Amino acid sequence: YGVQWRHWRTPVEHTQETWRDEFGNYYNRGGSLHIEETDQLKELIEGLKKDPHGRRHILSAWNPGELEAMALPPCHCFAQFYVTHNSGAKRDTLSCQMYQRSCDTFLGLPFNIASYALLTHMIAQQCDLDVGDFHSVILWSGRAWRNSSTAQLEHRDLWSQNRSRNGLALTMFTFLLK
């Protein structure tokens, strides 16, 4: 997924050009299309340094134009980074909130938490910030492993199966802790 962070591809269209030479002749050049790449990680770090308290420090892994080419669309859609000022502290702190559209609770969630926590530490170091909080938000469904020793996946939509009118049912938490 790092390719989306470092080489986000965007098609850019150039419009048709018409020009006239010194002899009065007109020439047309048709529109063209080329791909520009964006280094989101570089822009994120530069943005945090330039405007640390800004609200647009986002790193996206969800590129709709490339979903079909991916082996697996990313479960982690994007992460938002924010800086807070702590009175009495020497440096501000960098926190991260990662949003996931879906989640494999046995393998994917721990991997994503560890990866984004490490990324937060790395970015904080580059921006001369202390490390703050990390939050993981699962936007829709979670999948749980019934038997982790044989790694058989029993797809469980934990969101719809374990929800009550007052929020998440207690059975969701006991199922995950077994």
Image (cartoon, rainbow, N blue to C red):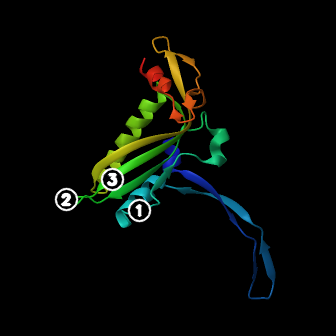
From what the image shows, is residue 150 above or below residue 16?
Answer: above
Pick whichever of labels 3 and 1 is earlier in the sequence: 1
Quadrant of the image for the C terminus?
Answer: top left
Tell me the number on the disc at residue 90: 2
From what the image shows, is residue 49 above or below residue 146?
Answer: below
* Secondary structure state at the residue bearing disc 2: loop
Residue drawn where x is 47% and y is 26% of the image: 170
Q: Amino acid at mark 2?
A: Lys
- Picture coordinates of residue 129, whole percent (x, y): 28, 55
Tell me the number on the disc at residue 94: 3
Pick whichever of labels 1 and 2 is earlier in the sequence: 1
Q: Are marks 1 and 2 in contact (CB under 8 Å)?
A: no
Farthest right residue? 25
Tell me the number on the disc at residue 12: none
Could you say which is closer to the camera, residue 140 or residue 116? 140
The residue wearing badge 1 is: 47
Residue drawn where x is 31% and y is 49% of the image: 132
Would residue 94 be found to the left or right of residue 38 on screen?
left
- Picture coordinates of residue 79, whole percent (x, y): 47, 48
* Secondary structure state at the residue bearing disc 3: strand
Q: Quadrant of residue 126?
A: bottom left
Distance from Cα at disc 1 to Cα at disc 2: 21 Å
Q: Amino acid at mark 1?
A: Gly
- Picture coordinates of residue 64, whole percent (x, y): 64, 47
Farthest front residue? 166
* Secondary structure state at the residue bearing disc 1: helix
Q: Residues within 10 Å of mark 3 (few under 14, many from 20)?
A: many
Closer to viewer: mark 3 or mark 1: 3
Residue drawn where x is 47% and y is 20% of the image: 175
Q: Amino acid at mark 3?
A: Leu
